[in-house]
Amino acid sequence: DAGVIQSPRHEVTEMGQEVTLRCKPISGHNSLFWYRQTMMRGLELLIYFNNNVPIDDSGMPEDRFSAKMPNASFSTLKIQPSEPRDSAVYFCASRGQGANTGELFFGEGSRLTVL
Amino acid sequence: RKEVEQDPGPFNVPEGATVAFNCTYSNSASQSFFWYRQDCRKEPKLLMSVYSSGNEDGRFTAQLNRASQYISLLIRDSKLSDSATYLCVVNNQAGTALIFGKGTTLSVSS
């Protein structure tokens, strides 16, 4: 079975450019999470969706960040404009309904470098 | 105080050693606790849940102390393949999402 699929795996961009990260959750999973990981701050929850509806976006650092989930099989995280401090690995994770609340299935991550 | 705190390590141990990691959490209302494992440049994966009475999975033992808001992971007979970062995880106040510690790095050498 396919796991959580993220794209791109790596992105290098210049400050000020728009970045769009994509995620396809595991089919049948109804919760989707976006995390960001850096050495300094570890793994931070940015936003999560339940049944395609954003539940909590309090972790989104600022207005430059936005996330959407137009349907059950696709989500995007957009940064506009990007800044060097946004450099991190961005993980998407999904969880099934009624599943062990602790088991998140992570994608391989999108490694973003903003120059 | 951070929501989930861990000693970052690294813990450098020889094969066969027993090693223990500790973690404290700030939200006394948390109900669910887990340990995740993350290999270098890979995604985190669930290692085990942590139950109130303590639980064991092979060489791994997890313990919870609610009064002290403290979680532990014990690894016995360490293997080279145990080298990884171990993330302590607690559910958020609403019980709907997971909050991760920054992780403790373990390096097992032969």
Image: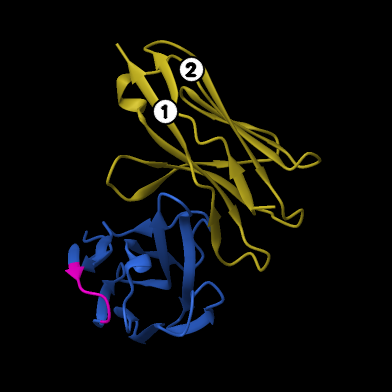
Q: Would you name the residue on which mark 1 appears?
A: B106
Disc 1 chain ID:
B
Q: Position of residue B13 (x, y in %)?
A: 42, 16
Quarter of the rendering occupied by the N terminus of chain A: bottom left
| Residue B37 picture location, percent across and down | 41, 40
Residue ID at (49%, 75%): A60
| Residue at image location 34% in from the left, 58% down from the top | A106
Cβ–Cβ under 8 Å for marks 1 and 2? no
Which residue range is magenta in the image?
A12-16
* Chain with colour blue in the figure: A
Task: Name the residue beneath numbered marker 2.
Answer: B76
Q: Label 1, secondary structure: give it.
A: strand
Q: Is residue B48 left or right of residue A11?
A: right
Q: Is residue A57 left or right of residue A33?
A: right
Q: Residue at x 27, y 46 (%)?
A: B41
Quadrant occupied by the C terminus of chain A = bottom left
